[in-house]
Amino acid sequence: MTFKEKVKKLVDEGLAEHPDLFLIDMTITDSYKIIVTLDGDNGVQLQDCIAISRVIENNLDREEQDFALEVASAGVSAPLKLVRQYKKNIGRTLKIKTSSTTIEAKLTEVTDEDITVEWSSREPKKIGKGKETVIHTEKVAYGDIIEAVVTIIF
């Protein structure tokens, strides 16, 4: 079993004990720095990172392979990668980049194939002078999304 396989197995074991957490990314550098990025259905607390870190650290032998370990939550500005992340952000505003456009819209629905977003814009009236507010709804397939980030509104 390679070092990376051992670490992945330990991460999976730690996450099995915390079903509301899920793995976003895990990398191991050439100098054996293990970087684990987590997210959770209800956010990630410091204690969650500590618990996963302990599962990994307590089951690896530094005599066999010296390593550095970093367990962190996905930052607020980190792009969404998994369907589970989209589901937890329903109702929030996302900035979505596709190959053809950039949309800033409210996430209203999530399926296994796509997301549905909604936004409003002021457009000229079809009849008469002035403008009216028009609500737009669009489905965006995950394959079309280059990057999706939750926008924080103060």
Image (tube, helix red, strand yellow):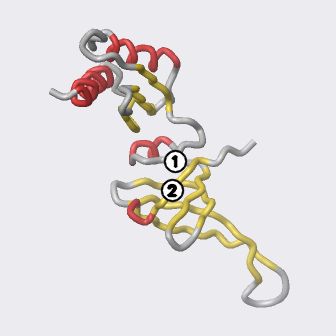
Query: Most extreme residue toward the front, as rendered?
Result: 31
* Distance Cα–Cα, label 2 vs label 1: 6 Å
Question: What residue would you read off at disc 2?
Answer: 147
Callout 1: helix, strand or loop? loop
Compared with residue 92, is residue 46 higher up or lower down, i.e. above or below? above
Give the labeled residue for mark 1. 79
Residue at the spot 80% in from the left edge and 78% down from the top edge:
131
**Of residues 29 and 148, which is closer to you in this image?**
29
Q: Image quadrant for the N terminus?
A: top left
Q: Which residue is drawn at 50% across and 70% down?
A: 99
The image's mark for residue 148 is none
* Residue 7, percent from left and from top: 28, 25
Assess disc 2: are there few (<14), some (14-19) or many (≥20) residues with their C-alpha within 10 Å of its C-alpha: some
Q: Is residue 87 above or below residue 38?
A: below
Say whether disc 2 or disc 1 marks the residue closer to the N-terminus: 1
Q: Residue at x 36, y 19 (%)?
A: 67
Give the x, y percent position of residue 51: 40, 14
| Residue at horizontal 64 percent and vertical 48 percent from the top | 151
Can you say whether 59 is above or below 117 in the image? above
Is the residue under label 1 in contact with that under label 2 (CB below 8 Å)?
Answer: yes
Image quadrant for the C terminus?
Answer: top right
Tell whether 127 sits left or right of 77. right
